[in-house]
Every structure is written in C-alpha cells, then in structure tokens.
Amino acid sequence: MMKIPHPIPYQGSKRNLADQILRMFPDNFDNLIEPFAGSAAITIASAYYFKANSFIINDINQPLISLWETIINNPKLMVKSYHDIWHGQLGNEEEYYYQIREKFNDTKQPEYLLFLLAKCVKAAVRYNAQGDFNQSPDKRRLGRNPSLMRDDILRVSQLLKGRIQFHSTDYQNVLDIATASDLVYMDPPYQGTGLNGGFNYAGNIEFDNFVVSLFELNNNNVPYILSYDGRTGDKTYGSPLPESLNLTKIEINAGRSSQATLLSRNEITYEAVFLSPALVSKIDMQKVTGKHNYQTELFAS
C-alpha cells in the first residue's frame, strides 16, 4: 500500500494521527483551513483520502510557506535543487551543513530550508532572536534520500496543485476568512516550546488572544478541530481551555513517545483534540467515538 507523501520533515507533525483526525471531518465543506500549517499533514491526508477539495494553509514562517509553494507549483525545480544540494554534502557532511545553513540565513531560499529540515536534529525548526536558523545537524545521517524526496514532492504537487491557497500572516487574519461552510484544523505551537529556542512565532501566541479567537469562531458557527494538549502518564500539557467554549474533548492514544522508548518507560502519550459546537452538530459523534477507543468529555458551561 502506497504511503501518504510527506516531503517536509517537521517536529510535531500530526501525520501519524491524521487518519484518526480525518474521521472527525463532516461530510461536506468548502475549504480546509490550516492556520498553523507546519508540515501540512492534515491537508495532505485530506487530499489523499478525498476528504476535501479546496485548501488554505498558513504559517507565520515565510520561508516555510515559500517552500510549500515551490513544492506544489514547481515540483521539478525543487526535486533538482534538493538532489544537487544533498549530493554536495558527500565527504564533507558537517561543514557543508553549516555552509547551507549560512546560505539559508542570508537568502531565505526554500531549497536550503528543505535540506536543513531533512538533515537537522529531530527535524526541529529552531531560530535565534535575530531570526537565523540555528539548529544543529544530525551527524548520524545524511538526510532524506533524494529519490524518496522526489517521489513525495511529485505526489504532493499532484494532490494539491491548483487547489490550494498560501498565506504567511498572523493566524488571526486567516481565521477571519473562515466561514460556517469551511472546516478549520488548528495545531498551534505547544505552550512552552517557543520561548526557549523555537521560531519566534511559537512564543508569540498569547493564550488569552487565542481563546478570544476560539470564541469568535464559535460566534460565527465555524466548525473547527483543535489539537491542543495531551498527557503522558501523570503529566498534562497545556493550560485548560474555558468550559464556556463548549468544546468536545477526544483523547487519541498516540502510543509511546520516542523519549519514553529511549528511557525504557511504558508511559503512553494521549493527544487531545477539541471539537467545536458547530462541528459536533454536523457529525455523528456516536459513530466517531464508537469506532475508536477515545475518551470523550463534553464541557458544558
């Protein structure tokens, strides 16, 4: 069975949970909107499984959106660029990585970013206070093989070309264009991950402002899915959302984290998604929860 293509490696990607998240989609809607696109895992999966026909992705990280635009609208150029950059490292891997990193910081060219993400530690985007990419290389590997990258780039372009809009702006601007006929999927940067070495936007999403945005979506009857918090063992992540949002919480068993595996721990990570009232009114919740071992909790005001 052919796998869903994922050309951009990205820490925190929801690609392994995408099939479960897609089961919460309504049958019909106009646009799938991702205000915090990152790896665009849900957009790609939605196109692959014919769950949506029109897509809007946004990320405040402009080079990342430029990368997506090139992959989807000019895939052959990106295939060749990645091939040439990847082969250029052979025999001089570590020094070459830092040379490419410097070129990216000087030019913000998307082909350099793709190589850095394919090669850096944990595929984690890290920028310093000056806006320069500062993540180190993973010295154990060369990064995604160009032939595999080629296949993913060409397949994603085939799935999305002509059906997607690109934005690089504050997430609130993108939420402003969402209507009751759309579906919004949000996977905001986790609290605490942005201030200590993440990309600048990760630390600038103020919790209170984000909650106001959720209330506005509710007031406009916009259906949305929010990947927000989670728990591992007794440890819970994320500040609690107001009960007055009337969200339905569903926990997804995400298995053991890589950290737990390294430490030989048996702790299971559960990732939470929250469904808006407008979405719950459009889907069969018994069907959604009955097929999977989700724990559901309806917050009532």
Image (cartoon, grey):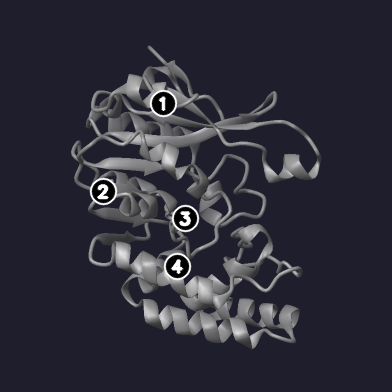
In the figure, residue 28 lies in which quadrant? top left
Alpha carbon of mark 4 to alpha carbon of mark 3: how far? 16 Å
Separation of marks 4 and 2 at Cα, in angstroms: 20 Å
The residue carrying pointer 3 sits among few (fewer than 14), some (14 to 19) or many (20 or more) residues within 10 Å by Cα, namely many
Mark 1, other Cα within 10 Å: few <14 / some 14–19 / many ≥20: few
Look at the numbered disc 2 and give the secondary structure of its residue.
Answer: loop
Q: Which mark is residue 38?
A: 3
Q: In this view, does 167 lie above or below 142?
A: above
Look at mark 2 in the image and give the residue it sits on.
52
Labels 2 and 1: the sequence-earlier one: 2
Residue at mark 1 to residue at mark 4: CA–CA distance? 30 Å
Say which label, 1 or 4, has the lower sequence index.
Answer: 4
Residue at 23% across, 36% down:
27
Residue at 28% across / 29% down in the picture?
279
At mark 3, the secondary structure is: loop
- Name the spot of residue 184 as percent of width and height, x first: 32, 41
Mark 2: few/some/many CA within 10 Å (<14, 14-19, 20+) = many
Foreground disc of the pair 4, 3: 4
Residue 42, given in percent of the width and then of the height, sits at 40, 48
Q: Which mark is residue 291?
A: 1
What residue is shown with label 4?
152
